[in-house]
Amino acid sequence: HSGVVHLLVNTAVQLETGAFFEREWGSGRWIVLYLSGAMGGSLLSCILDPDTVAATSSGSIMGLFGAKLSEILCQALFEQDTRTLAGRRPTPGTEQVGGVLCWSAIVSLLGLLPYVDFTAHLGGLISGFVVGVVVFSCNIRSPCFSITWFVLGILLCGMVFSPAVLYLLFRSEPEMDLEDACEYYRALYTEGYDCTCTMVFDF
């Protein structure tokens, strides 16, 4: 985290919505979606802005919001399997969609803080959505639609993650100055900064 405000807002959102989603989806689904948001946020941040040091911890939270939007879309388009918890819940209304968008906007505003990377928020949201298509396909009652939605989700994941990983591995070239973390922060804080880092990063 980049500071106290970033930490407090992220913690509040985790306790308010992250815990709710875990109870709603189960720990297994929750951790998959949470980590996919973290990975997508970090990937997009490294690709679009490789020459800066930034906090991307909010990407995982945005991944949960993206997944929730994916679940809402799935519930709106397809009849749900009543044997699942999702199938026994009412069809989401505008209040639920508005709540997700409102929390997403609040987290996105953190991008205005120093060293908080907005691109990580966007990457987390997109990643959570496409992985959510795969995860929530099993809630669809019709086997045909369920398989179709699952395959669509796999294709979307491939279209999102494969080019991003390949670009990061073979095209992205961070500034050489970032090899020395101490040098980066010494240039950033010119007065009274004593770097105690002992690790040098190799890119």
Image (cartoon, grey):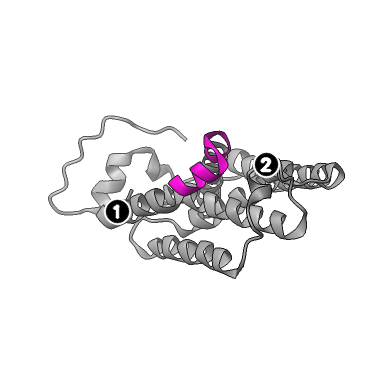
- Type of residue at label 1? Leu
Residue 79 percent across, percent down from the top left:
77, 53
Residue 193 located left or right of residue 201: left
Q: Quick check: can you spot residue 55?
A: no
Q: Is residue 112 magenta?
A: no
Q: Which mark is residue 84?
A: 2
Residue 113 place in picture, x, y as percent: 34, 62
Picture quadrant of residue 84: top right
- Please tell me how crowded label 1 is: few (under 14), some (14-19), or many (20+) other residues with Cα within 10 Å: few
Point out the tag, 2 or 1, that comes first from the N-terminus: 1
* In the foreground, 9 or 43: 9
The residues colored magenta run: 19-30
Residue at 34% x, 32% y is 200
Residue 35 in the image: x percent, y percent? 52, 39
Q: Would residue 173 be found to the left or right of residue 139 on screen?
A: left
Q: Residue furthest right?
A: 144
- Nearer to us in this view, 123 or 136: 136
**Label 2, label 1: how far apart the Cα atoms are:** 35 Å
Provide the secondary structure element on which disc 1 rests. helix
Labelled disc at residue 37: none
Which residue is denoted by mark 1 in the rendering?
Answer: 8
